[in-house]
Amino acid sequence: MTQVGSNRGSDLGETYSILPYLGSGPFHTVPGSGYYTIEDYRDILRHAKSRFVEVIPEIDLPGHSHAAIRSMEARYRKFVAAGNLEAAMGYLLSDPDDQSAYLAVNYLRNTTINLCVPTAARFTATVVAAITDAHKVGRVTAGVYNDYFCSGLNFYLFIYLFIYLFIYLFIIYLFIYLFIYYLFGIYLLLACLLFIIYLFILLLA
């Protein structure tokens, strides 16, 4: 990822870098190329925590993954050239036999991870684990929000919201029931009064 996916430049085959985008230019220089190291990310977490800001990482998959796909393809070619096919298949995000043709909104191809490839899950787990470990260093416990029910606090919050929603819906149901019940009772009372008035008028006539 840091050797290929983090670089943008004039490489039509995207062998050593991905194509320039948003005016990044043809050269592998800043702006356009570069990446945060793990220590850079930890510095961001510490800085944010010192100012009471919580950093919530977002891993947008399977789309928006052009750099990751090209990086893993470069990794694949590297290990194949070294004669290690098993390692080459370790984190592949695309199927070499896939003949699907599509064009993303940014006019790029191969921007979506093929979830049918078993190693896609391994790649995702590795990325999530790396970010989780980065959050654990330096007593920064922001966590990775890949599972809403990952902690007891969220579980109790779910129970609280469930009870609150149940009570709220019960009150609405009770209100509607009583409203209809008493509304029907009022209509029935008015009908009886009108009938009595009608009979009284007939008797007077």
Image (tube, grey):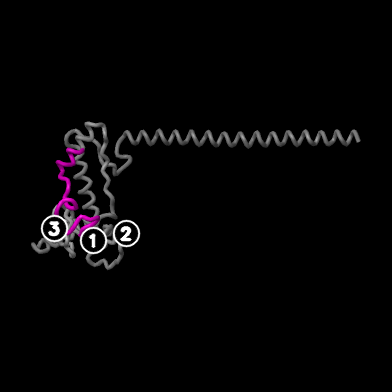
* Residue 90 image point, x, y percent: 17, 56
Q: Quadrant of residue 64?
A: bottom left
**118 or 111, which is in the foreground?**
111
SS label for mark 1: loop
Badge 1 vs badge 3, beta-carbon distance below 8 Å: no
Going by the picture, which residue comes out furthest to the left? 82
- Residue kind at label 2, given as amino acid type: Val
SS label for mark 2: loop
Is residue 201 positioned above or below 92 on the image?
A: above
* Residue 121 image point, x, y percent: 24, 53
Rendered image: mark on residue 94: 1
Nearer-N-terminus badge (3/2): 3
Q: Which residue is mark 3?
A: 87
- Residue kind at label 1, given as amino acid type: Ser
Q: Residue at x 22, y 65 (%)?
A: 96
Q: Residue at x 21, y 52 (%)?
A: 123
Q: Nearer the viewer, mark 3 or mark 2?
A: 2
Q: Nearer the viewer, mark 1 or mark 2?
A: 2
Magenta run includes residue 27: yes
Q: CA distance from mark 1 to mark 3?
A: 15 Å
* Residue 159 image point, x, y percent: 39, 35
- Residue kind at label 3, given as amino acid type: Ala
Instruction: Give the prevailing secondary structure in the magenta stretch.
Output: loop
Stretch in magenta:
19-44
Q: Which residue is mark 2?
A: 105
Q: CA distance from mark 1 to mark 2?
A: 19 Å
Q: Residue at x 30, y 60 (%)?
A: 104
